[in-house]
């Protein structure tokens, strides 16, 4: 694809899956803030448009020659993508969220006195956990069944379009909570007196962030725009 400084980050992430690892490396938000042009998203990261494009190109070449870790989801149907999201990312959260909550409670009770920021971490995480669990339920019970019933080129109903907007708002909320967690934990750096569970917790929080970013990317940059494109295409006929 033709990529320049004015291309939207979410578009690059959707079209060049190998770009995700480059964006992650430089802290470029490709999911909740994917609607920004590349040049804007790079401000403050210390890397130029030219340099990051070289790295993305290199990552894309390595992917072709070394392995095929990333599928091009833009070519798959919304139903296939929804199935993949549930099997991969919802399943991850179903297992991960309670485990992290359990470890966090232990760490707060043992270390909270010397690390009072852990109480704020517990508050933010608790809210994120319950909001994500509600969000997954909404997708699995309401949104994904509606899109699985769509014909190959059928436009989504106004009800489905309304639900998609709600999902995007909820993704923004999860993105902000993860950003806050990164701040509270100083980029997941454990203090010198951290025990094994403390270190495990910070590793789990980092894994949670990485998985949610890829999950939201698939929904915000591929699934939802693909469904909206059907409305535009049917209006143009
Ligand atoms: Fe999801
Ligand atoms: Fe979602």
Image (cartoon, rainbow, N blue to C red):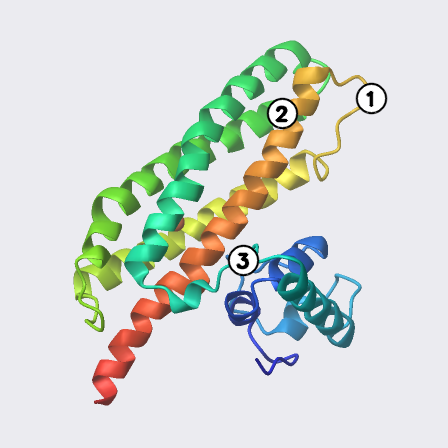
- Residue 70: x and y in percent read 54, 58
> Alpha-carbon distance for marks 3 and 2?
28 Å
> Alpha-carbon distance for marks 1 and 2?
15 Å
Q: Secondary structure at mark 2?
A: helix
- Residue 174: x and y in percent read 47, 45
- Residue 63: x and y in percent read 64, 62
- Residue 113: x and y in percent read 68, 13
Residue 190 horizontal side relative to residue 151, left or right? right
Give the mark toward the camera: 1 or 3. 3
Q: Which mark is residue 70?
A: 3
The answer to whether the residue bearing label 3 lies less than 8 angstroms from the nearest atom of ligand 1 is no
- Going 75% across and 33% down the picture, which residue do you hit? 189
Examine the image and state in which quarter residue 57 appears: bottom right
**In the rendered structure, which disc, 3 or 2, sits on the residue that comes first in sequence?**
3
**In the rendered structure, which disc, 1 or 3, sits on the residue that comes first in sequence?**
3
Above or below 215: residue 120: above
Camera-side residue: 104 or 214? 214
Figure quadrant of the N terminus: bottom right
Residue 224 is at least partly visible in this image: yes
- Going 31% across and 71% down the picture, which residue do you hit? 228
Residue 97 horizontal side relative to residue 54, left or right? left
Above or below 60: residue 183: above
Q: Secondary structure at mark 3?
A: loop
Above or below 213: residue 133: above
Q: Which mark is residue 226?
A: none
Q: Which mark is residue 201?
A: 2
- Going 62% across and 25% down the picture, which residue do you hit? 201
- Going 39% across and 56% down the picture, which residue do you hit? 168
Camera-side residue: 81 or 162? 81
Q: Residues within 10 Å of mark 2 (few under 14, many from 20)?
A: many
Camera-side residue: 5 or 174? 5
Mark 1 lies on residue: 192
């Amino acid at each position: 694809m033709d990529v320049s400084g004015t291309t939207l980050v979410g578009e690059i992430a959707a079209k060049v899956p190998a770009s995700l690892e480059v964006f992650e490396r430089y802290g470029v938000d490709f999911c909740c803030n994917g609607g920004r042009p590349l040049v804007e998203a790079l401000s403050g990261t210390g890397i130029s448009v030219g340099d990051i494009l070289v790295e993305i190109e290199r990552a894309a070449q390595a992917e072709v020659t070394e392995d095929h870790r990333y599928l091009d989801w833009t070519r798959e149907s919304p139903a296939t993508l929804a199935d993949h999201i549930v099997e991969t990312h919802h399943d991850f959260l179903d297992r991960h969220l309670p485990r992290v909550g359990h470890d966090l409670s232990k760490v707060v009770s043992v270390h909270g006195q010397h690390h009072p920021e852990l109480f704020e971490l517990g508050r933010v995480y608790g809210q994120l956990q319950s909001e994500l669990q509600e969000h997954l339920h909404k997708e699995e019970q309401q949104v994904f069944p509606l899109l699985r019933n769509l014909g190959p080129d059928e436009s989504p109903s106004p009800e489905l379009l309304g639900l998609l907007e709600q999902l995007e708002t909820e993704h923004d909320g999860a993105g902000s909570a993860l950003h806050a967690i990164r701040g509270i934990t100083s980029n997941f750096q454990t203090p010198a007196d951290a025990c094994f569970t403390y270190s495990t917790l910070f590793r789990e929080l980092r894994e949670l962030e990485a998985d949610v970013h890829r999950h939201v990317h698939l929904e915000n940059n591929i699934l939802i725009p693909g469904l909206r494109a059907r409305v535009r295409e049917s209006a143009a006929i």
